[in-house]
Amino acid sequence: MKADADKSIPDAQGLPRTNLLGKSESVLAKFFDGLGEKPFRARQVLQWIHQRNASRFDEMTDLSRNLREQLCEIASIELPEVVSEKKSSDGTVKWLFESGAGQAVETVFIPEPGRGTLCISSQVGCAMDCSFCATGAQGFNRNLDVNEIIGQVTHANRHLPIRANGEPAVTNVVFMGMGEPLANYRNVLPALDLLLSDYAYGLSRRRITVSTSGIVPHIEKLGDDCNVSLAVSLHAPNDELRDQLVPINRLHRIAELLDACWRYAAKRANRFITFEYVMLRDVNDSIQDADELAGLLRNRPAKVNLIPFNPFPGNDFERSRSKTIEAFQSRLRGHGIVSTTRRTRGDDIDAACGQLAGKVRDRMRVRLGEKGKKAARV
Ligand code: SAH
Ligand code: SF4
């Protein structure tokens, strides 16, 4: 996956080819208009790429031969380059995609009865600097472009076996890999468009979740623009503690964040917002914390997803004890708040939440030697 993935293969004249992988219907329609073709070509090509897994234009037999030849000259369908693939004993699959400068991003597939969830990345690193997150510790390198974001889904569907009902393996997509999706709004929005399009992935809004640390203006925008399911990384029941754990809180306080959440939920006919809450031993896991959290969310369209902290090297936090997590959860339930605890998946391949970046950097250093080591150090 290269920084300029859109234009990496030159055509016969040495001019850059346009990578059609991440182009939405409206962008493709303009592209075909420029070639003097009808707009419906966009739908045909979307279906070939995203539903019929075509990797070459000469496979697209319902396009005229002339158009196929022209596309071969000026365009490409380029997927991100895979650095490694690992399979966990629990069926979880993790891919590492090359993202230039000795860095990589991760994608994780989590199979469950009745669904297959793909956890995708939106940035190389992250600028938000949450104190318990390995991606945050890595710092920010760059935004993924649309090809690189949607390419994670394309790759997974092409490489995983289809489901028993004949449908593609990926039934749900969550933006919970590396990066803050709402800080890369420009590229995440067209990727969402492709996930929702009936001519590409055709997923319902319910099956797509954007997870954010709380960039309030973009929560508002997302509500207007495409209104997929929203998860918010809350992690603390008051501003004093959240300032420490999730630094963006110093810019957008909890009250402001929650107001935006309730407005978002109202736009979706009161569908629930998921609040993620990482369980950090003796930091945010007391019964008083549960009571305070319930006070923020009671009688609101909210559910809480408790995430046992996943440790990584160079970080002093510890995971809350199982008994503490159970007590926290039943306290929330006692307050009438729907609450679940996330089961850790893919532990043996370091695919659990927040564990992604550290080990990636280590592996890239081994692969790339001293040059990669420098580049990977942010
Ligand atoms: N940047 C977005 C989405 C990616 S992180 C966000 O923060 O919401 C996906 C989830 O994993 C977030 O809730 C994040 O806070 C959580 N997470 C990060 N590091 C973690 C860790 N070490 N253990 C458990 N969860 C973690
Ligand atoms: Fe970024 Fe999310 Fe990690 Fe915070 S938790 S540093 S927003 S990836």
Image (cartoon, rainbow, N blue to C red):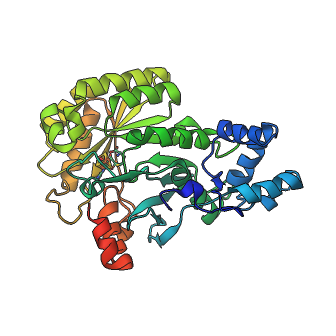
Q: Is residue 366 above or below residue 116?
A: below
| Image position of 245 (left or right of 116) | left
Q: Is residue 236 above or below residue 64?
A: above
Of residues 41 and 18, the one nearer the viewer is: 18
Of residues 345 and 71, the one nearer the viewer is: 71
| Image position of 127 (left or right of 237) | right
Q: Image quarter for residue 284?
A: top left
Residue 172 image offset from top left, x and y in percent: 54, 47
| Image position of 179 (left or right of 23) | left
Of residues 34 and 2, the one nearer the viewer is: 34
Q: Is residue 276 visible?
A: yes
User: Measuring 17% from the left and 31% from the top, which residue is drawn there?
Assistant: 292
Of residues 148 and 216, the one nearer the viewer is: 148
User: Measuring 72% from the left and 38% from the top, which residue is drawn there?
Assistant: 29
Q: Is residue 253 above or below residue 117?
A: above
Residue 248 image offset from top left, x and y in percent: 24, 37
User: Measuring 19% from the left and 36% from the top, which residue is drawn there?
Assistant: 290
Residue 20 image offset from top left, x and y in percent: 65, 51
Residue lying farthest front? 13
